[in-house]
Image (spheres, helix red, strand yellow):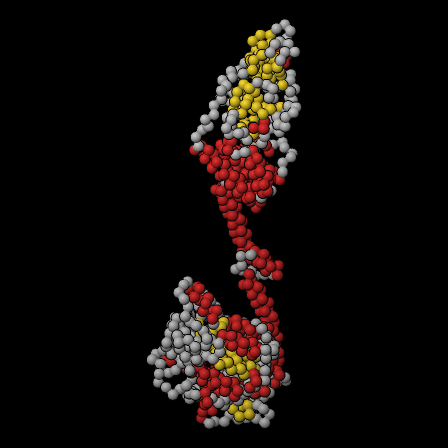
Amino acid sequence: MTRLRKMFRALPFALSLSLALALPAVLPGAASAQVLFKNFSEVQVTGAVSAAASANSHALIMYNSEYDHPGISDLPVTANDAKAVKRLFEGMGYPSANITLVENAGQSAMKRAVFDFTAKLDKDSTVVIYYSGHGISFQGDSHNYIVPVDLDPAVPGGARQLRERIFKDRSVSFNEDVLGTIKLAGPKGVVVFYDACRNSPIASDDSTKAVGDVASFVPAKIQGTAMFYSARPGQTSLASLDSEADANLSVYTRVLVSKLAENPTMRLSDLHAVVQSDVSKLAREKASGHRQHPVFEDELDYSRSDHNEFCLATVAVNGVARCTGRDEILVGGTETGGAVVQNAAASESGTNLGTAGVVAGGKADTERLYWESVMNSQDAREVQSYLDLYPNGAFAPIARLRIERLQKAAQASSETAAEAAFWNSVKDMDDAEMIRLYITQYPDGKFRALAEARIAQLENVAVDAERARAQQTYEDAQRSDQQAPYENYLNLYPNGEHASAVRNHLARMQSLYQPSWCRGSASLNLAERTICDHYELGRLDDRLNVAFRQAGNNVTAGEQRDWRVFKRDACGSNTFCHSRVMQERISELETIAQRAASRPSSSLRSSYASCPPTNGAWKVQGVSTGDWLNVRSAPQSSASILGAMSFNATGVSVANCQSNGWCRVQYGCTSGWAFGNYLGRGGSNPDGALAGIYRVVDHPRDSLLNVRSGPGTTFPIVGELAPDATNIRVRDCQKVKGWKMRWCTVEHSTGTIGWAYGQYLANQWGEKPF
């Protein structure tokens, strides 16, 4: 506020500092019974004022009296109010070019007028704003809103907040559109007279300056601004008095201009006091007990001293610009441009107190009285005004000492105030770093202990909040039972309370659901690696295999291969895409299986008897994995070949062995002689590289698949498989010269045992044994 005090020093008008009285002390007397103006044409400034000092004083006068919408009552009196105020400022010395009158403006016109007015201002300007008309405000909103003449109060039903938003959009924000715009020019100070009630937007037809009948007072304390309101919370501003039908001014404006016309240099605080008193009395006595108490919201610097006052215009007394009190009247200028100060009671009686700055007691008495008027002031400038007038006066030494003490106190107070302001600006913040700024700025400050306690509190709250968020994230992952939420927890809280449990869970699920084909394969493409890395996709892959087996021969290997290449592999690393296409494929396969199950079973029946089970005690041994053991018609190598056993065949029955090493063998439907060196007792043999569970595919539906005693069509047929046969056990598949596909050993629950051509076999993946 020290900066503001300097800003307003010796201003010619609004908010100018009231310098110490350059005249003998004037004893307060009873104010005269002033006759109030009834019409704007009567307004005439009679009090003394220095017009030249108002050269850079500006006035923005706005009124709205004729509203477009029938739901908003007209206020003819506001036009008279505005004209009365305009005559007042002209009489106070405001240049005509500096006075802007805005009449019955719509929203856009009013905003444009404010812009044009602001364009005239500079940093040395001082401003008075006067508004008369309807006004509204809203609960919980610190702004006041002017009702432009084109406002439509008809708002469709709906949420209250929506209705309020519509009203605000249609009105003019006094705080932002008016004050906010004017503040951009950086004027020294602003005084506002707001002669309107601030009510909720509910239609009303009373004779007050309000749109509604539910008042909602909004204080408007704005830095560098003094706000005069015509009514206090819950009250409306009277536009007329019941007993004075011939008065064409509203009650508040009528009293305001009458008081200022008589004493235009009255201090603002005194101005509010006399206006409030008279307005309240008039409303109570002449308007059937109506309650109207004007309000003064002051953000100018009055905190240091009762003597530091501001006024709308100044007058020079003995060459010193000053304001006057409520009971002082300045009349008649002197040849040097000064003014005579009279007591109000003395003026009424016609007593002349003498020429400006001179009283009956003489010069010494004048000096003493002047010193007594400033000696207890808390403002060093007021004490300095005595030294300016009497540099060698009797009280000069005491004045200099008083000024020194006040300056030291002011400096200490300023530093304390700055620290307090800093602390007040951050103490309620929820940001510990902002509060640490206070400790950095004031390491030994008086609020350090409070700052440290607040920081500790915020940090504890932050830790608790973070712990709660981590717990919630973990519980959300558990509920979802999906991989992504668990991984999200680890990304956010890699060292969190549940991090170890989450990692163990992910590892366990990966081991359970990762497809077997993922392990040890270096030739996986991007889509396959993605499936291997996400156990959710592994679970879907397992479901896909089941659905594929259930579909049986109703889905060809080519169809499944096309799906993998063009649908699954196209997803690349996009897990969402994989999940979608796999679930779609599962649904397709399950539908195919259901339809197949509803069809009658095939009428094809094999004409071959079941083969004996392969439960013998012998196995083939010592044969290369790329070869097989021939079974011949006689115990010699030149005998014809009847069949063949795979390199890993087990369950071979051996009847007897001859001295030449040949043994009588039975393996499924194949019976003959095999060389004994390639037979051994008991034990198991490893499966071949292409072993697995297969099904018949791509075979004509009207015929059976031949099963032979050996790998090739030269071997006799020993059994047949249906064209939709499934769950065929394959332990080995061998390449045979002249054949594109391999020949595979097959065993089926129908008792069919032998070799089948791989062209008509496919595993659970739809892959054929190439």
Seen from the viewer's position, the closer of residues 485 and 281 is 485
Question: Looking at this rendering, what residue extends furthest in the left direction?
Answer: 288
The x and y percentages for residue 270 are 48, 80
* Nearer to us in this view, 392 or 427: 427
Q: Quadrant of the N terminus?
A: bottom right
Is residue 496 in sight in this rendering? no
Q: Quadrant of the C terminus?
A: top right
Name of the residue lying farthest toward the top: 659
Q: Nearer the viewer, residue 351 or 317?
A: 317
Residue 613 position, x and y percent, is 51, 16
Q: Position of residue 587 (x, y in %)?
A: 49, 39
List the single residue furthest toward the front. Answer: 702
At 37% from the left and 77% from the top, the residue drawn is: 206
Q: Is residue 481 above or below residue 767?
A: below
Q: Is residue 618 visible?
A: yes
Q: Is residue 641 above or below residue 491?
A: above
